Amino acid sequence: MKKSEENKKIKEETLLSSAFNLFTKKGFKETSIQDIAESAGVGKGTFYLYFKDKYDIQNKLIEKKSQKLFADAIKALRKTDISNFEDQIIFIIEHIIDALNKNHLLLKFISKNLSLGIYNQAMNKIADLPYDDGSIFSIFMNGVEKNNIKLKCPEATLFMIIELASSTSFNSILYNMPLPIDEFKPLLFEEIRKILKQ
């Protein structure tokens, strides 16, 4: 990587880190682009070289944080001997839920947008068979294919599973609604298994 490209990457990462710290401490509405630029040690104009606006950097952060949650869960899955497809999906979802349960700031920041971390990547890869990049999307598509699971639209099914887990876990973790997360997880996993068995 050239020095100029490396410097650009460092500035972008600094802006992302500064934005995340400010968004989680001050709140999104209360944080200005000027705040982010100052915290990152760059001029306001530099911010616009990397991001369109505050919503753009927020979305990129949600994608990045969500992707890391999935990557960490998949890394943990690889250290197990779980070979059953349903069990693999449940393991990944539970790993992410447990990580969010330990980090309420991250949970509140991501809110109910966990799928944003895979949605753009996944939709770009629909036509790129075989699915072998090690992502949740490839694990899911390979599992559906190998187990001969008949889904009308596997991409949409994965999206629904992630959205279901994300939105219901959010309320369960933060507000114990409808149940505390440890009581809620078995019910959630049962529903995910039903979706995969249809």
Image (spheres, rainbow, N blue to C red):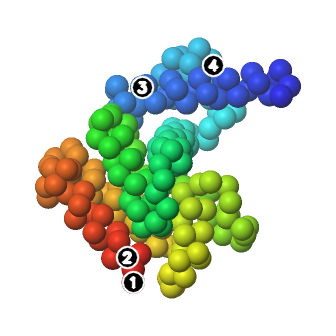
Could you tell me residue 69's position as x and y percent?
Answer: 47, 43
The residue identified by callout 1 is 198
Give the residue drawn at x 53%, y 48%: 78
| C-alpha gap between disc 3 and disc 2 | 39 Å
| C-alpha gap between disc 4 and disc 3 | 17 Å
The residue identified by callout 4 is 43
Residue 132: numbered disc? none
Q: Alpha-carbon neighbours of circle 1 within 10 Å: few (<14), some, or many (≥20)?
A: few
Horizontal relation, residue 122 to residue 198: left or right: right
Could you tell me residue 188's position as x and y percent?
Answer: 27, 63
| C-alpha gap between disc 1 and disc 4 | 54 Å
Amino acid type of the residue tagged 1 in the rendering: Gln
Q: Quadrant of residue 16?
A: top right
Residue 195: numbered disc? 2
The residue identified by callout 3 is 22
Q: Is residue 104 visible?
A: yes
Amino acid type of the residue tagged 2 in the rendering: Ile
Amino acid type of the residue tagged 4 in the rendering: Gly
Give the residue drawn at x 39%, y 84%: 198
| In contact (CB < 8 Å): disc 4 and disc 2 | no
